[in-house]
Image: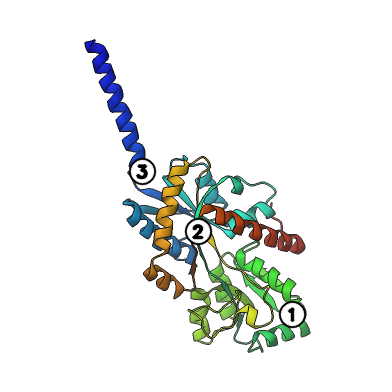
Amino acid sequence: MKISGIAGALALVAAMAGNGAQAAYPDRPIRLVVPFGAGGITDIVARQVGKGMGDVLGQGIVIENRPGAGGVIAAQVAATAPADGYTIFMGTVGTQVVNPLIYSKLSYDADKFAPVGMVSGSPYLLAVRAGVPAKTFSEFVAYAKANPAKLNFGSAGNASSPHLGLELLKLTAGLDIVHVPFKSGSEAVNAAIGEQVDVVMDASPVIMPHAASGKLRALAVAADKRLPSAPDVPASSEVGDAALQISSWNAFFAPAGTPPEVLEKLNSALQKTLASPELKERLASQGTQLYTGKPDEYQRFIAGEKAKWTEIVKRANIKMD
C-alpha cells in the first residue's frame, strides 16, 4: 500500500507537470527565421512584429537571418525544425509561391508549412533613372514602345520579386525591356542611380530617398492605392495599368505538425501585435501595410497569388535548376 501510494503520488505529480508544461507555452525564447539579411524591409518588419509578439507572449522572439538562394536556405531550416512552436518562419511570395514554380527540385514543401497568419505587404514602386526622358508612367510606356529592347531593367536576380514585377509590367503594358539581374536589390538600385540601367522596382524606403534627391524618378506604385510614404506617386490603378500590382508580402509559418493550440496562441499574439496603432503608423511611414486575419484567410490569399504568378512565370519562361 505504501509503495502504491508513493507511485500514485509520483504519477499525479508527473501528470500535473505535463499539464503545466503544456499550459506554460512558451516557456523559452522563440526563433524567427528570416530569409533575407539584416536591414532590408523584410528584416525590419520581422524585428518590429517579432518584438510585439514577444511582448504579448512573455518571451523574446530571436531573429535568425538565413539569406541566400531566394529564401530556400531559410525555408529548409524552418521546415526541418521541431514542430514544437519554438521555430517560426517568415515566408514570402518567393518562398511560398515562386520557388515551387521555378525550381525543378526544391528541398522543402511550401504547402506543408502550418500558416500562423499574414503579416504585411510592401508594394513596389516603379522608377527610372534621371536620364530617361519620361516624367510620367504614360510617357514611359510610350517611350519604351517607341524604343523596343532599348531600355534595360535591373533586378535583385533571376526570379526575384523585382524580376517578376518586370515580367508583369511587360505583360500588362506590352513592353519589350531587357532584364539585367544583379546579386541584390540594392545593387540594382545603385546601378540605376549610376545610369547603368534604366528601370528598377523596389519598396518605398529604397526608392523614395533617391527620388527625393532627383537621382531616380518614381512613376507609379504597383498597387491599387497610393502609399502614405510616397503620396505624390500615383497608384497603377490611376495610370491605366490596374493589373500592375506586386507586393513584397510575407506571412508567418510554423513547421508541419505544430499543435493547433500552439498555432492559435501564436496567431492570437500576432493579431494583437498587428492591431497596434503605433506599429501601423511606424511601418506605414516606411511603405508597409499590415495585414490581419486567421490562417484560413491566408489560404484564400495564397490561392489567388498562385494563380497569378503561375501564369506570369509560365509566360515569361522563368526556370531555375
Image-quadrant location for residue 3 = top left
Secondary structure under tag 3 reads loop
Q: Residues within 10 Å of mark 3 (few under 14, many from 20)?
A: some
Residue 197 visible from this viewpoint = no
Secondary structure under tag 1 reads loop
- What residue would you read off at disc 2? 293
- Residue 105 place in picture, x, y as percent: 67, 46
Q: Residues within 10 Å of mark 2 (few under 14, many from 20)?
A: some
- Please indicate whether residue 15 sits to the left or right of residue 267 in the image: left
User: In the image, what residue type sits under mark 2?
Assistant: Gly
Image: 58 above or below 154: above
Q: Label for residue 223?
A: none
Q: How is the image coloured?
A: rainbow
Nearer the observer: mark 1 or 3; the answer is 3
Residue appearing at x 33%, y 37% in the figure: 21
Contact between labelled residues 3 and 1, with CB atoms less than 8 Å apart: no
Contact between labelled residues 2 and 1, with CB atoms less than 8 Å apart: no
- Residue 84 place in picture, x, y as percent: 43, 40
Nearer the observer: mark 1 or 2; the answer is 2
Residue 105 visible from this viewpoint = yes
Distance from disc 1 to disc 3, alpha carbons, whole Å, reads 58 Å
- Residue 161 place in picture, x, y as percent: 61, 65
Badge 1 or badge 3: first in the primary sequence: 3
Badge 3 or badge 2: first in the primary sequence: 3
- What residue would you read off at disc 3? 25
Foreground of the two, 188 or 107: 107
Q: Residues within 10 Å of mark 1 (few under 14, many from 20)?
A: few
Q: Residue furthest top?
A: 1
Secondary structure under tag 2 reads loop
- What residue would you read off at disc 1? 150
Distance from disc 1 to disc 2, alpha carbons, whole Å, reads 44 Å
